Image: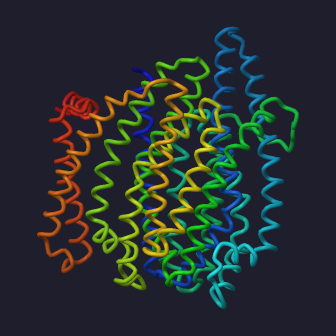
Amino acid sequence: MYQTKTVAKSAMTIMIFTLLSKLLGFLREVLIATKFGSGIETDAYFVANTACNFIIGVIGYSLTITLIPIISNMSGERLHTTKITHNSSNSLKCNTNINNYMNSIVNITILFSLAISITTWFISPILIKLLAKGFEGEQFILAVKLTKIGVPIIILTACNSIFSGFLQGNQKFNINAAIGIPSNVIFIIFLIFFSQSFGTEGLMVASVIAMLTQLLLQLYSAYKIKYSYKMKIKSKDEYVKNTFYMIIPVILGSMVNKINTVVDKTLASELVNGSISSLNYSNIINSLILNIFVIGITTVIYPILSKEFMKKNIKSIKIILKKSINIILIVIIPTTIGIMILSKPLIILFYERGAFDSNATKMTSLALVFYSIGLVGISIRNILDKTFYSFKDTKTPMINGILTVVVNIILNLALVRFMAHLGLALATSIAEIFGAMLLIISLRKKIGSFSIKFYSKFLMKLGLSASIMGVIVYFTYNSLDYMNYNFIFRLITLLIIILIGAIIYIFLCYILRIEEVKVFFKYIKRRYL
């Protein structure tokens, strides 16, 4: 019960910070769409970003995932030693061990990312040709230039990933959720005041400065919990060896996902101008939902599950996992239906202005519909991946990632011929659902039954509640003359429609006796009534 309350409380705090951060991030994307539209310049910028993040993004994510259980275990050993011996010198020794481990990882990563940065600078024309073979002339030259400007992002991303894992391993979650706030403010200031003068080159410089801001904030938080940097590498350290042993499957699993992104953009680069940008803008809305709700929960449960696995407490693991999945499904299922119904007004509201015209709205809103189909699959995969990582099983998610991407690429090649960029979005969704189903089967083998009977009833209740909500939202929206409103009235109208839908959905869930919703009502009644 205590663990469940801890997850709920910490996840709620992260959701609030993440919501603020992602709303600012969404405003950033709206401003990019307004200032630059959906065409040659934005396609070049997004491809250049991919070039800078392709390799280091994989390694950085893998470092974070690998460091969390290791740091969590080392911190647990420190507390355990202190409790048994009542000796602060033992605790100090454990602190020293953590510092030595961190410094070894930091220094190795800096050297490696520096080598990648230099290589990226020199082979940027080759990278752009690989990532977007449809780019020619000025668009190709611009993409190469932007890639070279963005090279410092490689080192900054690597260091950010390390300290993100360090802080989360010490159960310091808030700073990781909040660092997007000041970095997005930097983007917004640039886009409002300087974008016309400096164009997409300035936008890439702003990207570098924003990433630097994130690193400085994480360094400050790390020093507050007694981290001390030294230029030392202990490559023979047991924990360093364990990191490299665990990280290889994570890198391979993440790499295939990045390859999938590259395939998407490569195929989209051969379609009409704006296809890459449409996929990017629509995916941002999906990511906004995932980051606010799903990432908030998985960020908290990952180190907790790691500690429970150390204790071999399978019963506790099942309880935490079940509650987390239930909450995610309660949120994601109605969100999926809502996005499908309101995709066009959402895109009109947030993007359609300036250089972003009605054709871009049509392309982006349809892509959003097909991307939203896979929200449940992505959510379940995210939480189950973290579950396997907490068990120090990095091979299962790797194999799952490879199979998912193979399915995705096959579907990409099949569907793009008939559905253009929409086929790429649909292929991603189908592949994510396929991957989630495979992970569920694998997890049942590891921890036992997943209560299929319970989830069958649970999903039927959620599906019924969400469907009724969807019908009401659809007719409510279509009864309004939405297109003739100005921005403020559109925003208010959309918020009212969403609020009506949410109230109806929650009420129906309560009537159908969904436990988590009943607990929520009891909490509100006890706290406020």
Q: From this view, report whether residue 212 is shown above or below residue 109.
A: below
Q: Residue furthest bottom?
A: 137
Which residue is rendered at x = 39% and y = 76% of the image? 363
Residue 277 coordinates in the image, percent (x, y): 49, 75
Q: Quadrant of residue 131?
A: bottom right
Q: From this view, report whether residue 270 is shown above or below residue 334.
A: below
- Which residue occupies the foreground of this view, 434 or 458? 434
In this rendering, position of residue 203 left or right of residue 516: right
Identify the image's colour scheme: rainbow, by chain, secondary structure or one colour.
rainbow
Q: Residue furthest left?
A: 479
Which residue is rendered at x = 45% and y = 43% of the image? 380
Which residue is rendered at x = 27% and y = 75% of the image? 487
Q: Is residue 100 visible?
A: no
Q: Quadrant of residue 5?
A: top left
The quadrant of the picture occupied by the C terminus is: top left
Q: From this view, report whether residue 367 is shown above or below residue 177.
A: below
In this rendering, position of residue 130 left or right of residue 494: right
Residue 218 coordinates in the image, percent (x, y): 63, 47
Residue 34 coordinates in the image, percent (x, y): 43, 79
Q: Quadrant of residue 227?
A: top right
- Which residue occupies the foreground of this view, 247 or 227? 247
- Which residue occupies the foreground of this view, 45 or 269? 269
The quadrant of the picture occupied by the N terminus is: top left
Residue 338 coordinates in the image, percent (x, y): 27, 57
Q: Is residue 354 visible?
A: yes
